[in-house]
């Protein structure tokens, strides 16, 4: 399976990363989380004071910092788990980039063309030799010739309930309507930005998991991998 590129795109809170990790394990491929790179750039922008109180990003300054090589993002191998973790200027920021302040600002950062070009070049550097990569534009823009493209979606209310549950499990307080609004807002931003918006690639296989359990999704995946690659999971 070496050298294959599998793209897993779709809406937020549809379980893309869980799926992508399973596929990577089954196919002995590296898993790469493209959203994590946008999160790492967001962390940089917060630290450099480039995001104003009202959420506006100083895109021109960020562009300059990227051009000057100050925003070094990438993946480093975690020797304990053997998986890749995200690094900003040489240091792992894996835990930090999942926090709420990053989640609130990242979609604004991901709209900026110079950021997308920077992230894309890093994704190509790490993924071109074969990987399972999840994101929003992997099958349409980053690797349009990927060997398999999945597009994951689910009803927005179902996704909001899942997100709320995750937050509650982490001890974060939130109310359903606020989380639901955030899900809709993220969908809107992801699918309306000018450069490489979230779109289903014409040759993607769609998985709508609104009414599916994890076991049902795994059975679906198992059939797909068997049919496409002759793999039994
Ligand atoms: O999947 P995630 O929530 O970690 O993604 C973080 C943000 O990055 C989210 O706003 C969507 C954006 N993103 C993107 O625009 N393109 C990608 N390939 C991956 C993520």
Image (spheres, rainbow, N blue to C red):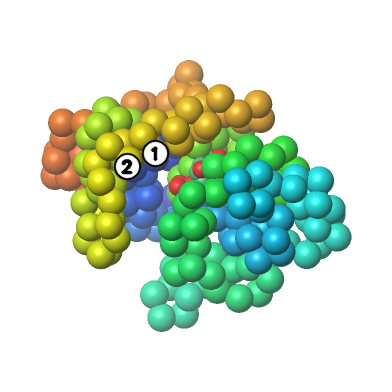
| 209, 233: nearer the viewer | 209
**Residue in the picture at 43% in, 73% down:** 82
Q: Secondary structure at mark 1?
A: helix
Q: Secondary structure at mark 2?
A: helix
Q: Does 197 sit above or below residue 65?
A: above
Relative placement, left or right, of 16 versus 47 is left
Q: Does 220 sit above or below residue 199?
A: below
Q: CA distance from mark 1 to mark 2?
A: 5 Å
Q: Residues within 10 Å of mark 2 (few under 14, many from 20)?
A: some
| 40, 1: nearer the viewer | 40
**Residue in the picture at 32% in, 42% down:** 179
Q: Which mark identifies residue 179?
A: 2
Rendered location of residue 213, percent (x, y): 14, 40
Residue 152 appears in the picture as rendered: no
How many numbered marks have been drawn onto this rendered protein structure? 2
| 213, 62: nearer the viewer | 62
Residue 162 appears in the picture as rendered: yes
Rendered location of residue 137, percent (x, y): 54, 35
Q: Which mark identifies residue 21?
A: none
Q: Does 193 sit above or below residue 112?
A: above
Q: Does 4 sit above or below residue 47?
A: above
| Residue 10: quadrant of the picture | top left
Relative placement, left or right, of 58 versus 18 is right
Outermost residue, bottom side: 80
**Residue in the picture at 49% in, 49% down:** 104
Outermost residue, top side: 202
Rendered location of residue 78, percent (x, y): 48, 75
| Residue 222: quadrant of the picture | top left
**Residue in the picture at 15% in, 31% down:** 211
Q: Are marks 1 and 2 in contact (CB under 8 Å)?
A: yes
Q: Which mark identifies residue 182?
A: 1
């Amino acid at each position: 399976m070496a050298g294959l590129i599998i793209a897993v795109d779709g809406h937020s809170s549809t379980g893309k990363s869980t799926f992508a990790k399973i596929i990577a394990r089954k196919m002995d491929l590296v898993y790469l989380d493209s959203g994590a790179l946008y999160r790492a750039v967001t962390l940089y922008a917060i630290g450099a004071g480039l995001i104003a109180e009202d959420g506006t990003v100083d895109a021109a300054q960020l562009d300059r910092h990227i051009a000057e090589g100050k925003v070094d993002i990438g993946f480093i191998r975690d020797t304990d788990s053997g998986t890749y973790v995200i690094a900003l200027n040489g240091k792992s920021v894996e835990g930090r980039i999942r926090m709420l302040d990053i989640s609130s600002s990242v979609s604004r950062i991901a709209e900026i063309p110079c950021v997308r070009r920077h992230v894309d070049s890093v994704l190509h550097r790490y993924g071109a030799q074969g990987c399972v990569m999840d994101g929003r534009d992997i099958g349409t823009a980053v690797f349009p010739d990927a060997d398999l493209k999945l597009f994951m979606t689910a009803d927005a209310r179902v996704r909001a309930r899942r997100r709320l549950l995750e937050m509650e499990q982490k001890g974060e307080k939130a109310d359903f309507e606020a989380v639901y609004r955030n899900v809709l807002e993220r969908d809107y931003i992801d699918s309306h930005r000018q450069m490489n918006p979230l779109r289903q690639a014409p040759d993607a296989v769609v998985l709508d998991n609104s009414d599916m359990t994890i076991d049902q999704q795994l059975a679906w995946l198992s059939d797909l991998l068997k049919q496409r690659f002759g793999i039994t999971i």
